[in-house]
Image: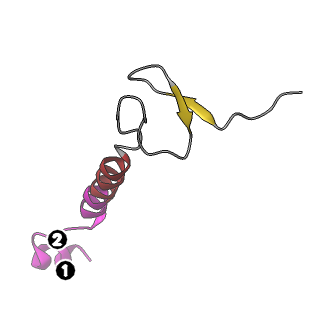
Amino acid sequence: MFEKSNLKNCKSCGHDFAKKANECPHCGQNMRKGLLLKLSIGIGALAVLCTFAIPVYNNPIKDRHSI
């Protein structure tokens, strides 16, 4: 049947290497970059959405008259 391979292909040089490796042993290309960047962009986007979700009252006296 089909076996799961523990190898992945390097996008830089095309050689196969272990999936658990952080970099290609043939060319040295880093394979796990971008995770921290994606996480920080996600947290930043969430912070921006939260700031727009907080209501802002410019004139509290006018609001009391409308009640």
Residue designated by label 2: 57
Q: Is residue 38 magenta?
A: no
Q: Residue at x 54, y 33 (%)?
A: 17
Residue designated by label 1: 64
Residues rendered magenta in the picture: 47-67
| Residue lying farthest to the right in this orientation | 1
Q: Is residue 60 magenta?
A: yes
- Image quadrant holding the C terminus, namely bottom left
Question: For the residue marked with disc 1, what is the amino acid?
Answer: Arg
Position of 23 compared to 40: left or right? right
Q: Looking at the picture, tell me which residue is in the foreground, 41 or 64.
A: 41
In the image, residue 6 sits, relative to residue 45, either above or below, namely: above
Q: Looking at the picture, tell me which residue is in the foreground, 2 or 21.
A: 21
Which quadrant of the view contains residue 5? Answer: top right
Q: Residue at x 56, y 39 (%)?
A: 18
In the image, residue 1 sits, relative to residue 42, either above or below, namely: above
- Image quadrant holding the N terminus, namely top right
**Mark 2: which secondary structure?**
loop
**Disc 1 residue crowd, few under 14, some 14–19, many 20+, Cα 10 Å:** few
Question: For the residue marked with disc 2, what is the amino acid?
Answer: Tyr
Q: Earlier in the sequence, mark 1 or mark 2?
A: 2
Marks 1 and 2, how far apart at CA: 11 Å
In the image, residue 5 sits, relative to residue 42, either above or below, namely: above
**Residue 46: x percent and y percent?**
33, 57
**Mark whose residue sits in front, 1 or 2:** 2
Position of 26 compared to 3: left or right? left
**Mark 1: which secondary structure?**
helix
Q: Give the label on residue 7, or none.
A: none
Q: Residue at x 35, y 47 (%)?
A: 38
Position of 10 compared to 8: left or right? left
